[in-house]
Image: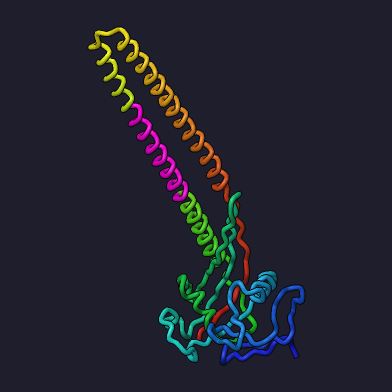
Amino acid sequence: MGKASFDDVNHTFVLRENPWPSLDIPIGRYTLIPGDLDAYHIRMGHPLVEQLLDVAKGKELPTAHLTFDLTSHEATIASLAPLKGQSGWIRISKIQLASARECHEDILFAGLTDSGSPLDSEQCPRLFGLGGDVGKVGVEPPADKLEAMITAQADEAFRNVERSNGNAFEEEMAKLEHWAGDCKKAMNLQIDAIEMEIKVKKGESRRSTGLTEKVKLEKEVKELEAKRNTLRKDLFNHLDEVERKKELMIDQIEEVLKLSQKTIDVMTIRWTLT
């Protein structure tokens, strides 16, 4: 008797023994259907699922013949109906696009019928939602055609990540320019206000007839000019800081744009849809 027993009709299983004692995986009944209070909900992120996925991803899968059963499926799948009665090939690969900041992974599907017609992006994954049987393969796959399809999808995935990085860069640069513009505008308004005040004080000084008053006004003008000059220096320093931030951002983006690409074959299958 194994570590678990499965009920395919109700989409449940009973785990009788924890396969990985070092992990906190409770034994008991599990279900794919949420809301069942008498069972654990098996889902992405659950430690049992994550461990099973790690084990599955590490397996080398031989080429096999999968016969998918559309006739007995409980729901109609319109995208698969044209494929009923046909056979062909599917290759599944994983692409990893890594940069200094992040790693992007995606699954690539390349599918063909025996007549050479490609399967679309919906048909390949939908086939794997059907029940079926596994058998042996008696013919060789069209490796060159499948490889060309995977390569085209990998190139498209690379361009999509580059496009996403480019959009993120433009957004950050726009935010920086907006912030710089707002600060520059606010500081120029302060400088303009001081310039106007200086102009008023100089006019008052020219019209004044008393020496004491003239000296007082000229001192006030000098103080305002010093304040204006300080603001001008602050403005130039601010603009220099913006340029430094731009250079830093460009350096960071340059690192992100250095993408390393790795494509890993997961499996190749011959398929038949009944």
Of 130 and 34, nearer the camera is: 34
Q: Is residue 33 above or below residue 159?
A: below
Quadrant location of the N terminus in the rendered image: bottom right
Residue at 54% of width from left, 84% of height from top? 33
Q: Is residue 87 above or below residue 102?
A: below
Q: Quadrant of residue 218?
A: top left
- In the image, is residue 171 part of the stretch drawn in magenta? yes
Position of 139 compared to 229: left or right?
right
Residue at 55% of width from left, 43% of height from top? 252
- In the image, is residue 237 part of the stretch drawn in magenta? no
Position of 187 compared to 94: left or right?
left
Figure disc tally: 0
Of 30 and 145, nearer the camera is: 30
Q: Quadrant of residue 15?
A: bottom right
Q: Is residue 5 visible?
A: yes
Q: Is residue 61 visible?
A: no
Residue at 47% of width from left, 90% of height from top? 74
Where residue 4 sits: x, y (%)?
Answer: 70, 87
Where residue 229 sits: x, y (%)?
Answer: 41, 21
Where residue 239 sits: x, y (%)?
Answer: 44, 31
Magenta span: chief secondary structure: helix
Q: Is residue 63 above or below residue 36?
A: above
Where residue 249 sits: x, y (%)?
Answer: 52, 41
Q: Specify the segment rendered in magenta.
A: 167-192
Residue at 62% of width from left, 66% of height from top? 265
Of 160 and 18, nearer the camera is: 18
Residue that protrudes farthest toward the left in the picture: 207
Position of 163 compared to 26: left or right?
left
Of 155 and 253, nearer the camera is: 253
- Chosen colour scheme: rainbow
